Image: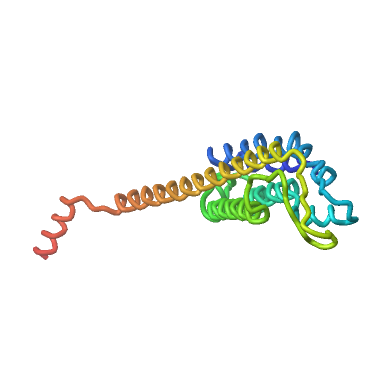
Amino acid sequence: MDWKFLQGLLSGVNKYSTAFGRIWLSVVFVFRVLVFVVAAERVWSDDQGHFDCNTRQPGCTNICYDYYFPVSPIRLWALQLIFVTCPSFMVVLHVAYREERERKYRVKHGENTRLYDNTGQKHGGLWWTYLMSLFIKTTFEVTFLYLLHYIYESFKLPRKVQCDVKPCPNMVDCYISRPTEKTIFTYFMVGASVICVVLNICEILYLIASRMVNLKHRGSVHTSSRRVRPDMDCDGCKSSLTS
């Protein structure tokens, strides 16, 4: 898989992100994509070839492997990385839409006119798009963590598994290659995913809090601009009484 292409696309998201979003992007590439490409793929590359069972029955080893590993963890992690990074493209597409509207507006009304003060500023529809992308990313992260725990019943890989699925003649013992090393990488990837979930939640809370503060500030400025001075109000009352 060409992870450089994915990195190039996500680099455009970085300039529109908050501080939490930039930390999230760093965690994804350093602790997830880089570890996945450099180490995790090699650790799990021999998972089926070194899955040994104490039987010579043809097809039993393959069936037992498929029974315990219906989806390879390395492929599940690859899907997880793709799904959790794709929602960020929503922000890039929305900014591109704004830039196109800005271009057409200037062509129609002149180069000195502006439709947006800053096409990448998170206000209006772009704020909602950014917030929605965070909710989608968090949902995907939690879903894949649940799937990983549900499929394998635990994040810790056992040294020995048993199965009696046909064509195995009876209860067969099978042994996983390098279970300790694979368990360590599993916990590492799960921990990195949990950190990303925490960062997404912090960014959601930060965006909502910032929006509430801005709305409160605008409301106070609008109220103060319409407020009438007390002395003028009293003069108005006196004039109404004398007329």
* Place of residue 155 in the rendered image (x, y in percent of width and height, measured from the top left): 63, 47
Q: Position of residue 176 (x, y in %)?
A: 76, 44
Q: Is residue 210 left or right of residue 227?
A: right
237 versus 224 height, above or below: below
Which of the image's four quarters has the N terminus?
top right
Residue 90 image point, x, y percent: 64, 52
Q: Residue at x 79, y 37 (%)?
A: 42
Q: Residue at x 68, y 42 (%)?
A: 10
| Occupied quadrant, residue 171 | bottom right
Q: Is 162 placed above or below 31 here? A: below
Q: Is residue 43 visible?
A: yes
Question: Measured from the top left, where is residue 228 in percent x and y?
Answer: 23, 53
On the picture, is 133 further left or further right than 157? left
| Quadrant of the drawing holding the C terminus | bottom left
The image quadrant of residue 58 is: bottom right
Is residue 96 at all visible to an observer of this figure? no
Farthest-out residue, right: 58
Q: Nearer the viewer, residue 145 or 58?
A: 58
Q: How is the image coloured?
A: rainbow
Nearest to the observer: residue 45 or residue 205? 45
Q: Nearer the viewer, residue 175 or 88?
A: 175
Q: Residue furthest front?
A: 170
How many marks can you see?
0
